[in-house]
Amino acid sequence: MAYQALYRTWRPQKFSDMIGQEVVTKTLKNAIMTGQTTHAYLFNGPRGTGKTSAAKIFAKAINCLNPINGEPDGVCAMCQAADNGTLGDVIELDAASNNGVDEIREIREDVNYAPTQAKYKVYIIDEVHMLSTGAFNALLKTLEEPPANVIFILATTEPQKIPATIISRTQRFDFKRIDAKAAYDRMTYILDQRGDTYDEAAIRVIANAADGGMRDALSILDQALSFGDGHVTLENALLVTGSVTQTLLGEYVQAVVQQDTKAALAKLSEVLSAGKDASRFVEDLISYARDLLLHTEAPELISIVPDDIFKALASDTPATVWYRMIDTLNDTQQQLRYTNRPSIYLEVLTVKLSQPLPTTAPVTVERVSATQVVAEPKPQPQRPQAVTPAPAQSTTPAPVSEAPVSDLTGEPASMAPEVNETPVAQPVPSRVAPRVSDDQAAVFSVLSAATRGDLDRVVAVWADMVNMLPVPQQAMLNVARPIAASPEGLVVGFDFDVIKSNAMRNAELLNTMVTQIQNLTQAQHERQLVFVNAEEWPKMRAAFVAQRKGTAQTTATQQQVETQTATAVADDLASLTAMDVASEAEVGPAPVVAEAERLFGSDIVEEIDD
């Protein structure tokens, strides 16, 4: 007989042979024992986790003549026929190559015939998400009213592609990835049964490389056995999987943590010279950093045996280093998918990881004062002399955003050294959450120069600006909208106060907003941002109107308003442009109001702005 691959030879024949899916196997066995089986099942999970194997075992167990605690006995005529593939009442269909309406219509006709040998007809449809829309519609009728002796088992790796009408008529079982320890135990069991020799470290490497798929693990093990002539060594496992030894990983990580770029690049060259796969190397680094992160809190979760380098790194390095490393590795892993020169990205990665952590003065959006929002601070010529404090004063640097406050509030120049305590040698961010506030004074500052045209221009590009943001930042602005704008400012209303607060603290979001709005509207300057709660907006608008009515009574103001009346009447009062408010305050009551006052008296008539 021709040689069969390990994953075929050692395919589970009973539920007890399956590993890592205890919830699924126990539920199916209990259903068979109690006779509570249903007409349709959906098996979902990653590749190589046992979906098709479980379907075949279930078909065999439900037709077994002498089931034992929900398991097939394996010796009766039905079990033997199922194992040999001669049981005609168990039909397997690959939806990837049989995804048309005709194949499903054929099934609809066949289900009306009784089983020829077994008690149930079992249809196993693999990769069911590949069926066409017409095929799903043809299958739906059968699932709605199936014959009593028919069972459908649908297997898929992508359940999101299956119509909800199909899923709702099935019992869904989610198969999880098989952890490395379970895969290790299964492979060592198979090797012991075969009488093959192996290194335990080699089996661990294969279990990690399988990434949760038992079939992948057995395929790699089969390859390693062939390469090593029946003996699985660590060297062979590393060659087959493209992985890197733990010692080499430790030396590389140690070099980048110690900021020894030259030594780290040398280790990288050693990895690449050995022909290791770049993507696998990055995955190994992520796993190594993850193990270092978990070593202190949950050492039982790590998949390697700690050596001296690993222990030293875990004890001497703060967790923030591993957070940063994993983030950087993840970004590089995404970039490697689109390049033909992975070595360049790995060299850049090495240099980047070897750089010291950035240490900048703490700057937060909430520290930006309302005074900064109303007036743009201008640099003072005295400031360079004030930024040379004694070394003892540099232990607690003040946020850079507070530096201009003394210039705007009229404080004495002697306070300047307290405002700028950051040493000259320390880098200072060039942009700090530009011009954001949420107080009424900032709103009035924007409204005093607001125009309908400015608001229309911002509204026209708002959706484009939002689409340029990452998804989390898009979510913030999905509950916000521009409600007033001037050449120098923009008022944005938020439906929820907590999201408004989070947006004010997001410096990246604020920088992107002001830059993109300026570019898209082709404005000459960036607009100052003012964030308000949408519920508070009507009150602020009314307060601004009342203020303008009370302060715009002089003759000069009256003349200015008269020259602007023709334009202001055409604008929407809701935009609260400066001309609108002035015309409302100065032009006088509308004709209908004046006529009402003439007929009934001004002490009776009351004008209410709705």
Image (tube, helix red, strand yellow):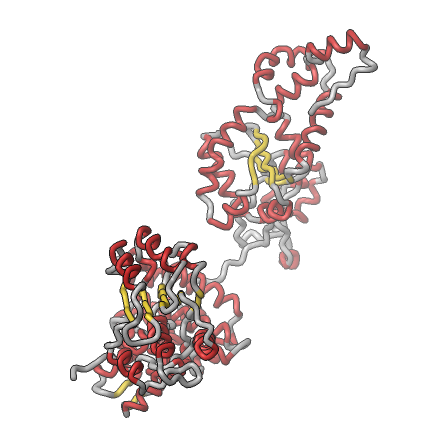
Q: Residue 68: image x %, image y %?
A: 41, 85
Q: Is residue 65 left or right of residue 391?
A: left
**Residue drawn at 31 percent across, 54 percent down:** 135
Q: Nearer the viewer, residue 322 or 69?
A: 69
Image quarter of the C terminus: top right
Q: Residue 445: image x %, image y %?
A: 64, 30
Q: Residue 288: image x %, image y %?
A: 42, 73
Residue 247 in sight in this render: no
Q: Residue 18: image x %, image y %?
A: 38, 79
**Residue drawn at 37 percent across, 75 percent down:** 58
Q: Is residue 375 left or right of residue 459?
A: right
Q: Nearer the viewer, residue 45 or 16?
A: 16
Image quarter of the N terminus: bottom left
Q: Is residue 342 left or right of residue 390?
A: left
Picture quadrant where residue 284 is located: bottom left
Picture quadrant where residue 210 is located: bottom left
Residue 36 in sight in this render: yes
Q: Eyeballing the image, is 320 above or below 75?
A: above
Number of labels in the image equals 0
